[in-house]
């Protein structure tokens, strides 16, 4: 378990697409958006852990077609999300009404979930990473996958939430400037598109 924890910490602290997504949301849209993004990503990780435990991720590993379909869906979703963000007009009002806020927060959470779930590289990561720390003879059971996966999830969620809080606090004053806020929104859109392109070019 000690070896697994060390490896998990190193992998979680290594910046990746999820980190960029959370940072983009946190800096451009604030603490709640960052937290919901982190929770959305973590929900996606839960799905991948379950897929790996049930052996469903093997489909992506063995089928090039399934891998390409999921990958392209994820890339397309991120590209559309990025374009919508770039085209979004900022009205200059920092505070939205409660109904709009709830709608936006729901979309942010769902986006985090889909961004992670539609990334087949994450599925293959868990499929390749977790078995290395499971004793021979126990790989047929889903329980070792779930235990290690949940451990990884807890560490990753804690780090993601800390990252969201730190980034949002750092940019809090900047976001209140209308021009800079608009620029941050555009940057966030570019980040989404960049992540989508990276995913589209991903290979097994």
Image (cartoon, rainbow, N blue to C red):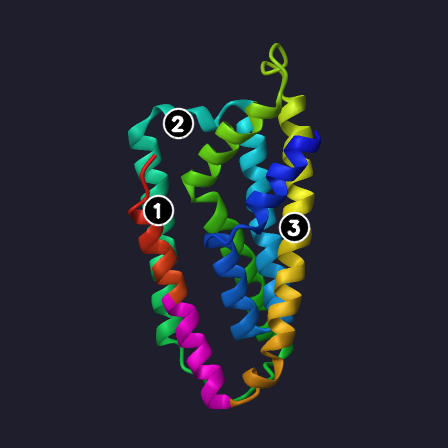
Indicate whether 50 appears above or below 46.
Answer: above
> Hey, which quadrant is residue 4 in on the image?
top right
* Prevailing SS of the magenta stretch: helix
Residue ID at (44%, 76%): 185
Residue ID at (32%, 43%): 202
Label 3: how many Cα within 10 Å (few below 14, some 14–19, many 20+) = many
Label 2: how many Cα within 10 Å (few below 14, some 14–19, many 20+) = some
Checking the image for residue 157, the label placed there is 3
Earlier in the chain: of badge 2 and badge 3, it is: 2
Does residue 183 show up magenta in the picture?
Answer: yes
Please indicate whether residue 119 sits to the left or right of residue 202 in the image.
right
Q: CA distance from mark 2 to mark 3?
A: 26 Å
**Magenta extent:** 178-190
**SS under mark 2:** helix
- Image location (x, y in percent) of residue 102: 61, 68
Residue denoted by label 2: 61
Residue denoted by label 1: 73
**SS under mark 3:** helix
The C terminus lies in quadrant:
top left
Please indicate whether residue 176 sits to the left or right of residue 71 in the image.
right
**SS under mark 1:** helix
């Amino acid at each position: 378990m000690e070896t697994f924890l060390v490896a998990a910490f190193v992998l979680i602290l290594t910046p990746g697409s999820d980190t960029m997504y959370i940072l983009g949301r946190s800096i451009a849209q604030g603490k709640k958006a960052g937290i919901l993004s982190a929770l959305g990503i973590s929900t996606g990780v839960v799905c991948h852990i379950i897929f790996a435990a049930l052996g469903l991720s093997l489909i992506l590993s063995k089928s090039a077609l399934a891998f390409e379909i999921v990958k392209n869906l994820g890339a397309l979703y991120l590209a559309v999300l990025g374009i919508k963000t770039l085209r979004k007009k900022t009205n200059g009002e920092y505070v939205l009404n409660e109904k709009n806020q709830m709608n936006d927060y729901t979309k942010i959470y769902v986006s985090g979930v889909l961004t992670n779930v539609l990334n087949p590289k994450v599925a293959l990561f868990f499929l390749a990473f977790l078995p290395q720390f499971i004793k021979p003879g126990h790989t047929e059971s889903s329980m070792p996958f779930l235990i290690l996966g949940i451990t990884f999830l807890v560490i990753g969620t804690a780090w993601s939430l800390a990252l969201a809080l730190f980034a949002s606090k750092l940019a809090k004053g900047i976001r209140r400037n209308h021009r800079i806020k608009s620029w941050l929104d555009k940057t966030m859109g570019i980040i989404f598109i960049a992540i989508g392109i990276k995913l589209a070019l991903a290979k097994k």
